[in-house]
Image (spheres, rainbow, N blue to C red):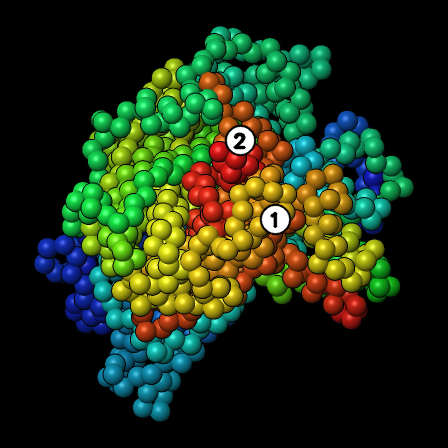
Amino acid sequence: MATKNDNPLDLLGTAVTRRQFVKTGGMLAVGICMVGTAPLKGDTPKAAVAKNSLDPSLASSWIEIHADNTVLIRTGKNDFGQGSVFTAYRQIVADELYMPFDAITTVVSGDTDRTPDGGGSFGFLNGGTPNLRKVAAYTYQALLDLAAKKLGLEKGKLSVKDGIVSGGGKSISYGDLIKGQQLSLTIPVQGDLTSIIGLSVEGNPPMKPVSEYSVIGKSFPSSAIQEKVTAKAVWATDVRLPGMLHGRVIHPKSLGSTLISAGQVDKTKFPNAQVIVKGNLVGVVAPTEWEAIQAALQVGDGTKWTDWKGLPGTAKFYEHLRNEADWKSTPVTKSSATRGDVGPALASAHKKLSATYQMSYLKHAPIGPTMAVGDVKSDGTVHIHTHNQNPQELRGEIAKMLGVTIDHVVVHIYPGPGHYGRSNGGNAGAEDEAVILSQAVGKPVRVQWMRPDDMQWSTQSPAAFSDVELAVDDQGKLVAYQVDHFMPPMQDDRLVGAVIAGLPTMAAPAVHGDFVTTTSNEIQDDWLYTGAANVIERGHGTFQVGQEASPLAVGLRDHSMRTPGQFQQNYPRELAISEAAALAGVDAIQFRIDHLKEERAIGVLTAVREASGWDTRPSPGRNAASAGSTPVRGRGVSLMLREDSYWACVCHIAVTPDTGKISVEKCTTAVDPGIVINPVQLKRHVEGGAMMGISIALFEEVMFDESGITQDDWSSYPILTMADIPELIVKLIHNPKVGKYGGGSEAANALAAPAIAAALHDATGKAIRRLPMKPAYVQAALKA
Amino acid sequence: MATINVNGERREVQAPGDTPLLYVLRNELNLVGPQFGCGVAQCGACSVLIDGKEMRSCITALSDVSADQEITTLEGLPARWAKHKGLPAETAKTALHPVQQAWIEQQTPQCGFCQNGMMIKATELLESNPNPSLLQIKEAYTTSGVSPNLCRCGTYAAIIEAVQHAATLMAKGR
């Protein structure tokens, strides 16, 4: 997700925009910041902070320094397996405060009543300056001011090591400095707490010079790992409240079916079970989980739904998407890389390529289906215990669903199965249903989706296709590149249970939605090949497939998943660039380098070339074959810029043409994120991303008929297993002269597909421009 | 009412006999190491050891487990190791099973939801084969059970390194 916050959002009517300023008088003269155009006038009136919220203007809402010189930090982002809040955030704060890593003893994350800033759990490093870094920098200046006064020295004469301020032969710890008093410091923030971005800390406090980092750059372990491995972690799945009932939801028969009648529970078999109906939502609750599961199956069998056949089905899908979807209502976007005049360049070209690239819908597919405990209390307050990437936005959405203000809602966050973007707008699936059922029975209810619910009723990463036309001249130069990207919207944050129940939700993606809910297809993948003279990149948007036709307003709902939108644009581009290199008769890495100016992009390509054992030559290889039962081998490359980090990947594959089966034998990834904060954690996450990338490239495709998704388990939606993994090489390029740290792991997901597809072309001489590269598709394409 | 033997203790449980063991462990005994992933033995998140063999607790009915059989959950791994090595039971309160230690030292989990099953499978493997080859590790996690053990975060390489590291720790007796 982009994390720019130029236009604070107010999707849910809960925006609290604060423009508060650091005071300039006395000991509070820290980090004077200019926000907006208002002058500094001492106290600026504070906007109201909702009950059950922390005041983000208080430094202690973010960072608490204790008398024993230990530190507690709070962040609205929470961990989804990246570990950033337990590793990188502690390292960043420790360095800004000139303290050791171990001094940051406590991390509070996610809970809406205990963290200040909200926002989706993505883009943790926020262009090198996460909120907590700025707060730490403000706090450091305030501490120096305090010490200067206490020690009777000028601020410039002080130095700090391990949280102890020294100067003029005297020293004092932070803990002693602030003992018995509140650090008087106002943190300037703005934004919408319950939006996808949350609040941003404003201003430009002086930051620690990169050359003085001593905690950043070291491989500290994640404290979350220790707790999970020893069964000490309290997972969302473990939450048990007094009087809590177990709930299961009977989702409609199709993505457009409405309820005719709910089944009755057989009280002879399930004496304690109860059926709850709200709109088209049917739930079953019981005191024990097993009774709830069995009763829900029995009630589900007796529940009657209308039929609906409003989807095109997988077989006709791309034809539908190209010819029947409405691409006209949504304005076409263009990238800033657009330049020159592509038309004449294409017309007069030496060699041309005109091709279409297709990508399937993908499931986020967490290992555990979504679940939540809802607890609607008799006084009208609502507590939700769950695992969610954006608890404050969930809080806002639940408030909207119930018609109450956000100070009635608290979301408590626990670890859970990673779901890679699915809930960065607040909804993974079960949260609202747990609240609806709890409200109906007046007790806490734990709703656990079963595996089929999670496969069929969650959102998916949108399918897409791209039309590329390019040309190379007789010097082997890319002279024209034109792409039209077509993709449905990717951010449906509506609470699905509320939609089914007919309760208020935020809007579905629409032509005139804001930057999150728009149907507009922005260009997400930065164009890197500045050596190409004529470039045009266009984005075409449409509505979610089936959503408008569905009597439930559901259809195939989409949601961002690791490198959202960028993956759908980078795969066609990078495969097309490899094909252009082949047309030019030039090695695919050298061809890229020949068209690049950015040193860091060239650097990752050079690094991946060396680390992977790349053999420099044009594609296809000399032994390429598109038929036969003997495996043929090839290698391909891909390149991406994401969140200030440069990435390159080489995949070496073997493919058996007669069966179409691909085996990735080696996957080499090089990344230059600027400053590497934690080498071991970054390496592990690059490895993981590479694996998910291979899984997406080879296996994953959402299949649906005219009524809904037909997959309901891991056998019908297979993902990568350990048997499928290649040799993995990760090359981290620590590049401190960049002066900041770029995004960590998610780009690794996107890199494998175009590299494998280019390797397939290298091995067989045929370009296969469709994901996933399932054996049947590859086999058919090679025979064609 | 049934009696089962979990992590070295005999436990009386109330659940009907057809209840999957997973819900008995999690909801009655508060042994929450095993997780619900699929409910149909396709992922391994719910794995436990029954007499040393990795089993999927989501499809194992309570009535299919006798009081003589020894169930080990993630919580019971330290005690299992202490018993195996003839160490005082008190050791298990402070020392981890080498598999857990290796998982931490290798920084293996990401979201960690599948890792219960991954550690259970590693324990099963290393108890019968103290020095498995790469191929044997891959077989253990893909073809030895009723389904492969699935990890969505893609930690398979980290799991392999952790199994190899655990083998070293176990050989040293830690």
The type of residue carrying mark 2 is Met
Q: How far apart, in angstroms, are the residues tagged by discs 1 and 2?
A: 34 Å
- Residue A746 seen in the figure: no
Return the residue at label 1.
Answer: A631
* Chain that bears disc 2: A
Name the residue located 77 percent from the left edge and 54 percent from the top edge: B125
Name the image quarter holding residue A769. Answer: top left
Question: For mark 2, does the 10 Å Cα neighbourhood hold few (<14), some (14 to 19), or many (20 or more) residues?
Answer: many
Give the answer, above or below, for where A172 lies relative to A323: below
Residue B8 x %, y % = 83, 50
Residue A616 x %, y % = 45, 64
* Chain that bears disc 1: A
Q: Is residue A348 left or right of residue A140?
A: left
Give the answer, above or below, for where B107 lies relative to A486: below
Q: Nearer the viewer, mark 1 or mark 2?
A: 1
Return the residue at label 2.
Answer: A455
Q: Of marks 1 and 2, which one's residue comes earlier in the chain?
A: 2
Front residue of this view, candidates A354 and A111: A354
Name the residue located 60 percent from the left edge and 42 percent from the top edge: A628
Give the answer, above or below, for where A398 lies relative to A123: above
Q: Secondary structure at mark 1?
A: loop
Outermost residue, top side: A260
The type of residue carrying mark 1 is Pro
Residue B91 x %, y % = 78, 64
Question: For mark 1, does the 10 Å Cα neighbourhood hold few (<14), some (14 to 19), or many (20 or more) residues?
Answer: many
Q: Is residue A629 left or right of residue A53?
A: right
Disc 1 with disc 2 on a shared chain: yes
